[in-house]
Image: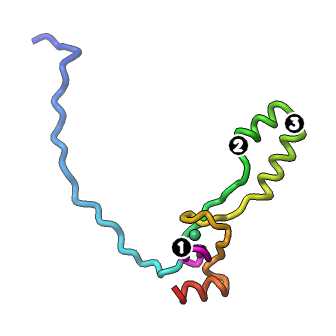
Amino acid sequence: MRFNKNMTTPRPPIIEGPPVIAPARTKPLANPRDWICQQCLWIGRPKTYTKGSIILELFLWCMLVVPGIIYSIWRLTSRAKVCRVCGSEAIIPCRSPRGLQMVDFK
Ligand SMILES: [Zn+2]
């Protein structure tokens, strides 16, 4: 029999391994690194929100360098941590006194 390049070799049967068991959640209700939202009481890691747009920033850098610098500085200074759920800036660390109070209240 001639070897045919297009001939597909039979694939070995897929052997299914044991099911992946998720590790038991041992972490307490509120991680000290988590933040709590004062608007919707969501607990977790906030996302960093930067105002303005990256496209406008790049445009200003390409066209006019000085406004580009000013715009970049404004964007960096207006960067804030926001809630992942409602986008509110009223978000505080869980380990802060107010945060601990809110976690207990929740
Ligand atoms: Zn929220």
As helix, strand or loop, the secondary structure at mark 3 comes to helix
**Ligand 1 is within 8 Å of the C-beta of the residue at disc 1:** yes
Residue at the far left in the pictured view: 1
Around disc 3, counting alpha carbons within 10 Å, would you say few (fewer than 14), some (14 to 19), or many (20 or more)?
A: some
Numbered circle sitting on residue 54: 2
| Range of residues picked out in magenta | 31-42
Q: Is residue 71 above or below residue 62?
A: below
Dominant SS of magenta comes to loop
> Along the line of sight, which residue is nearer the eye, 104 or 86?
86
Q: Is residue 34 magenta?
A: yes
Of the image marks 3 and 2, the number of the one nearer the N terminus:
2
Task: Identify the residue shown where x is 14% and y is 10%.
Answer: 2
Residue at the far right in the pictured view: 66
Colouring scheme applied when the structure was drawn? rainbow
Quarter of the figure with the N terminus: top left
Around disc 1, counting alpha carbons within 10 Å, would you say few (fewer than 14), some (14 to 19), or many (20 or more)?
A: some
Numbered circle sitting on residue 65: 3
